[in-house]
Amino acid sequence: MIHIEQKTHTTQDGTTVIVLAPTGRLDITTAWQFRLKLQECISKLSRHIVVNLGQVNFIDSSGLTSLVAGMRDADKVKGSFRICNVHPEAKLVFEVTMMDSVFEIYDTEEEALEAGPRSMAT
């Protein structure tokens, strides 16, 4: 079981953004739960998602796959999918797999939320 903290943030222009902060490992045993949570949030709450990975110290290919799936879900509904605060242990996985060039990755949650409507408005 993975613990996922969920917050709702409203931007200045009134856009609702869901911030998800999983804790622990995002691997083959937990990725499916995270994937379901992403699907649920995008379909029911908001098409704009920020994933804070500050508390995820391990991520494997299934964890990355769940993130890619979330990004695709958000794209399908013309939303946005941003990742922030990647844990140093997990950052290497993003770099080695070149996923750091696929995702919009920000240093802090604030930066991810304030990145503006660039991809949110399209």
Image (tube, rainbow, N blue to C red):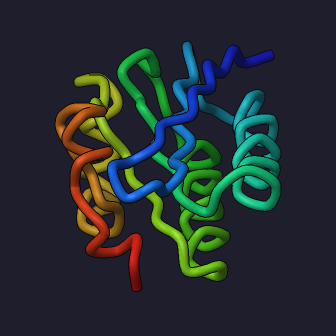
Answer with left or right where residue 62 lies relative to residue 67: right
Task: Between residue 46 and residue 74, name the one nearer to us.
Answer: 46
Q: Could you tell me which residue is drawn at 46 percent across and 24 percent down?
A: 58
Q: In this image, 119 relative to 71: left or right? A: left
Q: Is residue 78 left or right of 66 when viewed as pictured?
A: left
Q: Which of the 4 image quarters holds residue 72?
A: bottom right
Q: Is residue 48 above or below residue 93?
A: below
Q: Position of residue 52 (x, y in %)?
A: 42, 31
* Residue located 76% across and 41% down the image: 37
Q: Where residue 53 sits in the image (x, y, percent)? A: 41, 29
Residue 82: x and y in percent read: 39, 53
Residue 75 rendering spot, x and y as whole percentages? 56, 77
Q: Is residue 45 above or below residue 22?
A: below
- Residue at screen point 82% across, 46% down: 36
For the N terminus, which image quadrant?
top right
In the drawing, does residue 4 fall left or right of residue 23? right
